[in-house]
Image: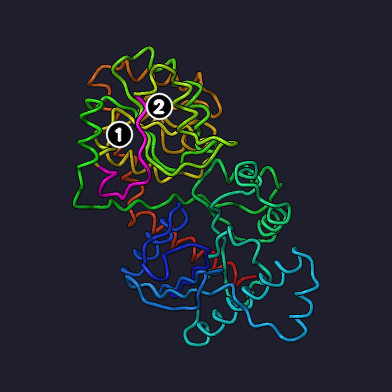
Amino acid sequence: MNIVYVTNEYIDSNTFKVFDGGLANYLYKITTYLAKLGHNITVIVANSSVDKQADYNGVHVFWVSNIFEKTLLQKILFAISSKKMRTKMRNDAIWNKVNKLIKKLHEEKTVDIIQYTNCLAQFTGKYLNNIPYCIRISSYAKLWQKYYNYSKEEIKNEISQFKNAEFLYGPSKYVADYIKKDLKLKQEIKIIETPFIPSFYEEDCRLSEEITQKTNNKYLLFYGTISALKGAVEISNSIYQILSEYKDLYLVIIGKQLPIGNELPVDIIKNSAKEHAQRIIWYDRQQHKTLFPIIKNAFAVILPSRVDNLPNTCIEAMSLKKIVIGSRGASFEQLITNGENGLLCEANNSQSIIEAVNKLMNMPDLEITNMEQKAYERTLLLAPEKISSVVLDYYNHVIKNWRKK
């Protein structure tokens, strides 16, 4: 099958490192796996800083820059236009470049299907209706708005994109159901979970050993982006009671901080912990070879997001046989069956986090071991050979029904 993916994030054009974030990581996994199966895979990274192409791990990658040549008339219009109009002109130019590239690829070898990400809604001018396409839902700007300050125009564009798309799919049932209800969509949103490919690294245990010396491996771990969206406020509101109750327990936090108001979230959490602040340990983002030993040695992983889209952090921790405390009403319930393969707290509810930690701390060792094993077994359902088969079946469904239309 000849498949084209259009995205705004994938791998860096210079270092070829995968971008931070769930979308890039998902795309990298699925595209490289499908390429290994013998499919012809092309990824177009729109709104890049350069125009460039390269083959990487069997995938043809094109970076399309946000620079465009202006005609004399466009230069005049650009100079006198509002910021909103200039943005539209730039986006239209990017989209024209993307479409021109797809047309060229289609002429060279028939493109069977295109998959767009909804994160490119602001660029969607005109799709090429002679080629079947689907849209994978990575987020919903309306849900995420207060955390990322999306403009009204961006939200409007995304809503229009969803309403006009005949074929939509996404990993999170929670997000899909929310969109379908919110927009009163008639079309089905197919649920296809994110594939999980175990990563094997030569582990760097130096930081893990440092944490062990400080905590004796009795720590809850939060890792990922530290922000209000990911539950930093709820952690801060619950941490004093948790650390007061369990005198030998620590909280280890690893990740990039996004300010909440004018404060950094780790400072907020430490201030809330009061006299227990020395049992809050923070490190900045870490590479997987350093991060994995820290996850493995954690007593449990706590991920109380307010909203999420089947997060990789949860899948990763479960694959390493860790109990995850995740939030119900933020898509974690799709992965976690409360009390069986992990624990659920309520989103936006600090008291619920305390209750989940209390339950964990009072569980017998055998029950913890069984829960950790079941967490691992859930991730086996996300094996790439299983997920890729579902994805290819869906692509064939799109192609078949597109041609009927």
Rounded to the nearest angstrom, the CA distance separating label 2 from label 1 is: 11 Å
Looking at the rendered image, the quarter that the N terminus falls into is bottom left
Q: Nearer the viewer, residue 357 or 81?
A: 81
Q: Is residue 318 above or below residue 189?
A: above
The label shown at residue 80 is none
- Can you give x and y, in whole percent of width and height, for residue 57 in the image? 32, 70
Circle 2 SS class: strand
Q: Residue at x 45, y 52 (%)?
A: 21
Q: Nearer the viewer, residue 394 or 227?
A: 227
- Can you give x and y, in whole percent of width and height, for residue 175 in the image? 57, 44
Circle 1 SS class: loop
What residue did someone put label 2 on?
A: 343
What residue did someone put label 1 on?
A: 322
Q: Quadrant of residue 326?
A: top left
What is the basis of the colouring in this image? rainbow
Q: Nearer the viewer, residue 122 or 197?
A: 122
Dot placed on the residue nearer the N-terminal end, 2 or 1: 1
Q: Residue furthest top?
A: 245
Q: Residue at x 71, y 47 (%)?
A: 184
Q: Is 145 on the left-hand or right-hand side of 215?
A: right
Looking at the rendered image, the quarter that the C terminus falls into is bottom right
Q: Is 137 on the left-hand or right-hand side of 224?
A: right
How many residues crowd around disc 1 within 10 Å: few (fewer than 14), some, or many (20 or more)?
Answer: many
Q: Is residue 282 magenta?
A: yes
Q: Residue at x 40, y 31 (%)?
A: 302
Instruction: Residue type at mark 1: give it.
Output: Lys
Q: Which residues are magenta?
A: 279-292
- Can you give x and y, in whole percent of width and height, for residue 160 in the image? 71, 58
